Image (tube, rainbow, N blue to C red):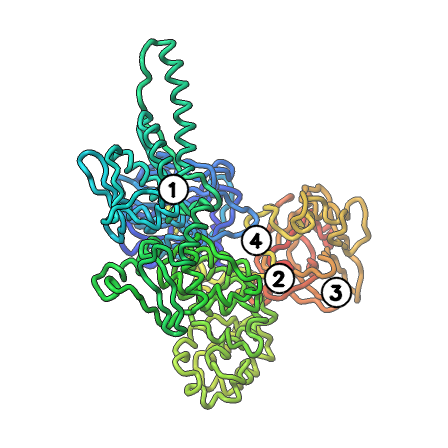
Amino acid sequence: MRFFDNSVLVVPPFDCAWLSGEDLKFGKAGRGCVSFEARADNDVTVVFKEQAGCKHYRTDTEPNYTVILGSHLNRRFKIEVNGQTVVDIAGIVLSPSVFEKYWISIEDGMITVGKGEPGRGVVYQWIDLQPNCKVQYVGLSSWDKHVGYRNIRVLPPPRCNASARPVVEVQGMYGVAEYLENEEFADIRFVVGKDERIVPAHRVLLAACCSRFLEMPLSAKNEIILPSVDYPILHALLQYIYMGRVQVESFQSLQVQNLAKVFGLQCLVSQCEQLNATYTAAADDYTAVEGSELASHIVEMAYPIDGQYLEMFPALSCDIVAKRLSKFLAIGEYCDIVLFLDDCGVKIPAHRIIMSIWSRPISKMFTNGMMESSTREISFKDVHQEAFIAMVQFMYSGHFELDQQDNAGSLLLPLLVLADQFSVRLLQKECSEQLHQCLTEDSVCAILQVAASIPACETLREACEECCAKHFDYCISAPAAQFRALDNMCLMQILQHPNLWVTSEERVLDAVLMWAADLEGIFGWEDADMKANGFDSFSGNRVQHLKDLLLLVRFPLMPMDLLHRLEGSSLSNHIPIMKELVKEALQYLRQDLTCSSELREDTLSIDHTTQGRLVSLPRTSLRFSRRLSNLKELFYMCDGDGNGVLQYSGTSYGQHPWMNPVLIKRILVSSSSPFSRYTDPKAIVSGKYQCTSFAGPCMKDGRYWSWWKIDLGVGHQLMCNYYSVRQDGSTNFMRGWIFQGSVDEEQWTDLKVHRKDQTICRPGQYASWPVHGAKSLLPFRFFRILLIDSTACASTPWNLSLCYIELYGYFR
């Protein structure tokens, strides 16, 4: 079990790492969440127990929950309780070539699994009816392959956003079904049956759905009297209109058909006719064979779906209903209110029932006993005229047409705000989707300002943050007023986004100080430096967020000369945290890291016990890590893992199955001695064991030189943080050598110096070493292993006898 510089915990096969420490267990037993990134071929396994410790979950006899991602050779998802499988489904598979972010929450027996940030991207939930409310410790385990974990956090259970759950997004909304046979807003009544039962209804709905409704005789009391119709038959008709579906006894379908004909509800008539024909044929066949009658049964009929199904108002799925309602809105037919827009004097005749179907706030406005409940004219202040009219039209038609010129969301944005204000959820969803489609680097900041203020627009907000991150330099270009208008949480999310693309880390500092100043004429740190004496006064209430934002700037990635300029700037003198961060970066870059081949002692604390391992996470910071957005991460998992740059180059960078990269000319391999049967570039990258493979010595400047060199090709570079070699079948074990990188093959940088290294001690042995600190941040095209001391074999002391080399890190 190992931690590397980038804080990756690698769990070997059939092992388990238990997180130790007060901050790495659930704050309250039975309730907590673990968040992490994982990379594996299969079986990312997380175990939850009352007490830490156990070599492997398969051998554990104590109570536990076990969640397995990518089980069965990365084909299934499993949850086990005390060793017994309770969930085993296809899905939630892993992507072996990349780290993916997951979270698992346990809250009083409810296990929630998600991808992404905690609380978002819920992919599965399961409830234990007999919950174990004592689990408190987290174990990270594996099966038959190495598993890499990083960015591990233990948190309280997150609040899951409903829109992230795998359910229909319109569920839980109020709709027309709520007003079925409801006196609220009713303006017409049916009198049915011999007992003259009163059934309330809504004229505008009936007129929109039923073509012959206007032909129905209406009494002076606004009543339709149907003495020959039984209540269950009328109820079935109204249920079909209001709810979009109805269940009736098969013997009642003929009566429902006849009533639907009277009202002109043709879609229900057609379904009843088809049902009656089928029932009659079945009854004839049954009688002919058995000599008895066919028993009645329950049948269901529903609106034919034409376009998107609208749970709020199912009848709108029929075009003819939407057209009739839109007509009623246009001419004010059956209207019982007038919507008055104070700012522009516009009046819109409308219907309380239609408005209330879509909007709970408006419904409460009509029913709370206040002035709006009794007055015919309802005033709305401070609303966008065109957006309000579009929202009302949407309520009557179920859709809206977007002007093709509205590429920047000039109508969509205020419409989205109104949809949120009045809780018109389906319209909110439509606006979010259309804004997502027209998202560009020019419009993203304006859209993000709105999306960030609306909790239900989480997906749109995340898309905006990603777009800002990918076009960061463009978004902060002058005048950047919309970027400066973002709130601090949006800016923090962008700066922490894994896809943040920047031309230099200096641009990140420019953006932070430009946002904090929020003044015209300040576009970067140099502009702010000129006004640093008054910095506290012109940054206003944003100065309190400056510390948090500066912590997200990765000063160690900046060049030395820039850091020296920052160190002597007025900004550093007036902003203490910036001074500390610049000083920290300079110390980091100055330190001599070439002498040590071991990890720092404070990065790992492992208690080797007979029952698994207790692990304390490394104390590291993202400030010292490279940004990964435009780099391909090639992560060292174990010796011969196939994850390195030579393996990746052999696939033409992920385009096809592996071929020898030397043969397909993706890379070049050279050596200190001429190519021969035992000095073969193809062999050194093939990954196959070679009994004899060496680079012989050459004479230069009066001394022997032996080396293997790799050229990644024009336009390709690697920030190398790990490298592996394999000894051939000889005993020419290396004892002193240098691992180097170069941009031009002229100037070489020592990445790792080995002296009297006894690691390799047997033929065919693998050996791997990390590259630490600032040297691992430098990109190189050329790499070589240079022998600087004689090997362990006296007969051929200068033969560099390697049959395999692989490099890892961040490739571009």
Please tell me which residue lies in front, 375 or 659. Answer: 375
The label nearer to you, 3 versus 2, is 2
Decide: marks 3, 2 in contact (CB < 8 A)? no
The residue under label 3 is 745
Cα distance, mark 4 to mark 1? 71 Å
The label nearer to you, 1 versus 2, is 1
The circle drawn on residue 212 is 1
Residue 20 visible, this angle: no
Image x and y of residue 740, in percent: 67, 62
Cα distance, mark 4 to mark 2? 11 Å
Seen in the picture, residue 197 relative to 430 is either above or below; the reply is above
The residue under label 2 is 719
Decide: marks 1, 2 in contact (CB < 8 A)? no
* Crowding near the residue tagged with mark 3, few <14, some 14–19, many ≥20 C-alpha atoms within 10 Å: some
Q: Amino acid at mark 3?
A: Glu
The residue under label 4 is 635
